[in-house]
Every structure is written in structure tokens, then in C-alpha cells.
Image (cartoon, rainbow, N blue to C red):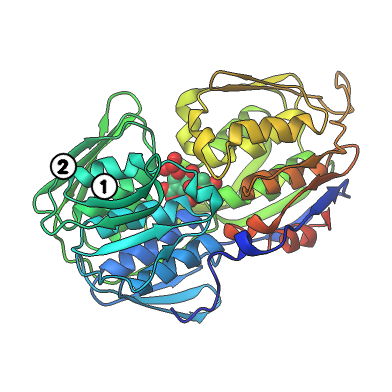
Amino acid sequence: MSSTASSTASSTAAPMPLAARGARPLAGRVRVPGDKSISHRALILGALAVGRTTVTGLLEGEDVLATGKAMSLLGATVARIGPGAWTVDGVGVGGFAAPPETLDFGNAGTGSRLVMGAVAGCPVAAMFDGDASLRRRPMRRILDPLVKMGATVLQAAEGDRLPIMLAGARDPLPIVYATPVPSAQVKSAVLLAGLSAPGETVVIESEATRDHTEKMLLHFGATVTVVPEGTHGRRITLRGQPELHGADVVVPADPSSAAFPLVAALLVPGSDVVLETVMTNPLRIGLITTLREMGASIEAVDAREDGGEAMADLRVRFSQLTGVEVPPERAPAMIDEYPVLAVAAAFARGTTVMRGLKELRVKESDRLAATADLLRVNGVTVTIDGDDMIVEGFGGKGQGGMGLPPGGGTVATHMDHRIAMSALVMGLATERPVAVDDAAFIATSFPGFVETMRSLGADIG
Ligand SMILES: O=C(O)C1=C[C@@H](OP(=O)(O)O)[C@@H](O)[C@H](O)C1
Ligand SMILES: C=C(OP(=O)(O)O)C(=O)O
């Protein structure tokens, strides 16, 4: 790979404390970086295609750069041709070469798990590793179906965790797999392995998760059909052994990154902000749906489509929010947004109940615990009841409100970018500043976060 960026900068660098304090109204237009999910997939499918893939708007965060490096170690030619513009010359389905060194995914669950799927369909062995956070995350959910498809786990740390040495199948088997957890990463790993298998690989999910892999497989020339399954689920069928051809991929702005300036604009009085070209895939906008139910002013302007993905500019204005109950079936559409939703809930009038958050326990940190701690050290009452989180809102300074959350705390971020950004957003609107112990991991998904927020008028330093 022609980029010099290291995938493990965050884990080796000294901690980077930072604080946010009460701001004047936020105003202006910004475009947050490219979608992380689409960026990983563009590099992986580009590497498995024949010919050249050109990606524009790629997220140049550490997670995605680690995937780019892995693709070049597996034999693809990955080059940066300009800011956010990359080319991938692929090796074709099943064509990965044995990598000469460990594939180090740093902090990235998505990169490590999707690439395990892609490697499982090739007759090569690769060592997968990551930072201390990634080494704690469960990998059995990925290994189980991949072993069924013919891959072999040659080595793994206790509890089927990284570092893992995985040998791909010489003759991969197609399977019908009902995912035991709602996870786009598990679904995608099976589909990527299934590319090399003859016949049909089927994934059945009882709750629909983000469908970027399915959409991008179609874009690269595979045959994929998707039909509803049960009340909230889907059945995805991939015809194996297609010839994928290189394609152009335009990456829209990441709604999971846009969530931070979006919630900040809702919380800081007088704010009026436009977030440009935000992806609005229905399986990614649970946060927007929820915030609108809470009374948020979020207007989608110039809604359009590119490469099969919906996008729009979002105009967001300061709003008095009211607590709501968020149903568990919405979780997959906003799984990474609960920490920042919980921050918004702390400013709302009344109680917000978020149900069905089990998967938050196995992210970069135990996000259920980390989010509750984030709020508590800043004076907010939070209850964790099983897999549900209940936040008591302060309600603001107006009629019926109890004022603003006090703030004044230092938040332990536990190597988790979303906890760090959520805490800093909170500090823009609390009575006193909010500090974080380490903001370095923000670079995994949102390089330029602090500069972007400052360009809107935020006081972070
Ligand atoms: O497939 C993806 O790109 C992702 C899927 C989600 O993880 P799970 O599949 O573990 O829910 C999400 O949390 C992650 O940030 C990105
Ligand atoms: C959970 C996340 O990512 P990953 O699983 O790729 O580490 C995230 O970005 O919030």
C-alpha cells in the first residue's frame, strides 16, 4: 500500500486528554468523513475483483487504513491517488496470496471480521491480530460459520480471541446460516467466504442489519437476492463463484460520524448546522428517527442516490428534546449511536428508555457500562436494567426543565472512539466542561473530528 499511515498509532501513542466546554451557537456547513462500513467493503471487494476499483471519499481513518494494508499484504495493489481517492487492483475471487506478515487490524472489528471471511474462501493461511481492545472482542461468532464452510483455526487465544491464525478452505462449502446475533459483520464474513463456494450461500437474519455488503456485491457484478424473513428479518442468497469486476465507489459521509455534530447542534442553544451528503440508508438512520420522535429539528434537504445508497444534506437546529422509549428492534439501525443518544437523552425533558442493547457490551469497550459511567461522572442519573439503559433527563432551562446536566467530569474512554466523541459533545452544552482521558482513538473513525467541531464554533482543546 502506498500510504505510510500505521494502523496501530492510537494504541502505541501517549494518551491524549481533551476537554469541551460550553459553546456559543454552532453554525455552518460541514462534511464529515466517508462511511466506515462502505470504505472497508470497497477495499475488500476491490481486492477480490478483477481489474481496477476506484474509490473516492474513502474514510482515511486508522480502521480503514488497516484494511487497506491487509489487502496489499494479501496480494492486491492498493494506492492512494489523492485525498480520499484510492485505487485497488484486485486478485479475483479466491485469489489471495499468503501474507508475508501478521494482518494487524488495530482497533477495527469490521476490518478483522470481514477479512477473516474473505480469507476463509482462499487456500491461504493468515495471522490476524489487533490492539488490546480488539483482542478482547468475541471472534467465535465469525469462526463458527467459517469453519462450517471449510476454514481451519490453526491457532487462537483463549476464548477464540485474537491473535488468530486462520487457514482458508481449499474447496469452500456453501452453507445456509442463521446468524445467532444481529450482526452485519457476521453476515458479511459469511457472504465474502461464500464468494468462493460453488452454489448458493444463504444468510438468514432475524433482524435486518446494515446491507452495504449485499449492495456492493451487486455493484461489483455478483448475483444476490434479498427477501423478507419473519417480522424484521431478511434472507440473503449469494450465487457463488462470480467474476467480480472492478468498479467505481463513491463513499458518502458516515451517518455514525455525522451523529456527533448533529447531536451537538441539537443541544447547544441557537445552533443551526448543515451536514452535507450524509448517507441515509434506512438501516443506518435509527438515531435520526429516534431524535425526531424526541422533537429534534432535522430536515433532509436534496435527498438523492448514488451507487445504490441514499444520501441527503441534513439541516439541524437546536431543539428542546423530550424523552422517549426506543424499541429493541431499532437497535441494529443505530447500534453505534447509543452513546451519543444517551448524551442527548440527558438534556431531554423526562426519561429515555433504550431497550435491547446487549450487543453494546462487545464493542471497542463495554459501551453499556462506559456510556452509563460517562453520564454519571457528569451528574446524570442512569440505570442499567438487564440489556436496557434508562436515562433521566434534565430538561433544559425553560419552563418545566430542571436545568442542564452539571458536567465537570473526566470520562474514561476505554480505547473507544465513540465514547470519547460522545463525552466531548456533552461538554459543549453542560454547565461545566467535560474532559476525556484519551481522545487518540477518535482517529480510528473520524480523523479531523476536533477541527470539524471547531469549524462550527465548538470550544474543544
Ligand atoms: O458491518 C459493519 O460495517 C459494522 C457493523 C456493526 O457491528 P456488528 O456487526 O458487530 O453489529 C457496527 O457496530 C460496526 O461499527 C460496523
Ligand atoms: C463498533 C464499531 O466498529 P468496529 O466493530 O468496526 O470496531 C464502531 O465503529 O462503533
Residue 48's spot in the image, x, y percent? Answer: 27, 67
Residue 216's spot in the image, x, y percent? Answer: 33, 57
Tell me what residue is drawn at x 85 percent, y 38 percent.
430
Q: In which quarter of the image is residue 168?
A: bottom left
Residue 176's spot in the image, x, y percent? Answer: 17, 38
- Quarter containing the N terminus: bottom left
**Lower sequence index among marks 1 and 2:** 2
Residue 56's spot in the image, x, y percent? Answer: 47, 71
- Quarter containing the C terminus: bottom right
* C-alpha span from label 1 to label 2: 9 Å
Q: Is residue 236 visible?
A: yes
Q: How crowded is mark 2: few (under 14 residues within 10 Å), some or many (20 or more)?
A: some
* Closer to us: 410 or 152: 152
Q: Mark 1 points at which residue?
A: 190
Tell me what residue is drawn at x 71 percent, y 29 percent.
345
Marks 1,2: beta carbons within 8 A: yes
